[in-house]
Image: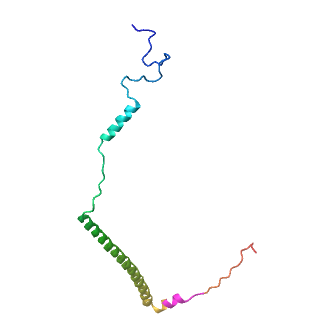
């Protein structure tokens, strides 16, 4: 049978029980937990970064990439220059075609386009308006 006046194991000195979850009998203190944590971190392998010098093949590849980029830049400049020349050539061809079309027109049509007619239109006021 249960004793009625027995003090619980988590009781304070004045006899009142402690608040919250009862502690386990094998619970660790804060210092013990910290020591275990430090020991576990020391046991982990340490990572080491090693920087190696570039190999001869890598240097050769970098030089090749640099040379190819330079050639590509030269080709792009050449293409741009050719494009500008092509645009100028097209404009010249269009201008020559227009002149040729004018030259092929009969003489009377060429003169008719140059004649300007001046018509004088007189208007009468509408009835009811001054």
Residue 5 vs residue 32, the one in the foreground: 32
Residue drawn at (65%, 85%) of the image:
120
Q: Quadrant of the N terminus?
A: top left
Residue 33 vs residue 79, the one in the foreground: 33
Query: Relative to 39, is 111 above or below?
Result: below
Residue found at the very far top of the displayed protein:
1
Residue range of the region highlighted in magenta in the rendering: 110-117
Residue 58 figure quarter: bottom left
Q: Quadrant of the C terminus?
A: bottom right
Q: Position of residue 21 (x, y in %)?
A: 43, 24
Query: Relative to 15, is 103 above or below?
Result: below
User: Could you tell me how many numbered marks the image carries?
Assistant: 0
Residue 102 figure quarter: bottom left
SS majority, magenta: helix
Q: Position of residue 57 (x, y in %)?
A: 23, 65
Residue 49 belongs to magenta span = no
């Amino acid at each position: 049978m249960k004793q009625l006046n027995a003090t619980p194991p988590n009781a304070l000195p004045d006899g009142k029980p402690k608040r919250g979850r009862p502690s386990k009998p094998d619970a660790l203190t804060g210092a013990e937990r910290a020591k275990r944590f430090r020991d576990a971190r020391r046991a982990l392998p340490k990572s080491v970064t090693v920087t190696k010098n570039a190999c001869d093949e890598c240097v050769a590849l970098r030089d090749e990439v640099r040379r190819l980029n330079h050639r590509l830049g030269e080709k792009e400049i050449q293409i741009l220059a050719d494009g500008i020349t092509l645009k100028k050539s097209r404009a010249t061809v269009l201008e020559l075609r227009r002149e040729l079309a004018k030259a092929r027109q009969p003489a009377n049509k060429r003169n008719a386009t140059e004649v300007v007619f001046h018509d004088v239109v007189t208007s009468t006021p509408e009835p009811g308006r001054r």
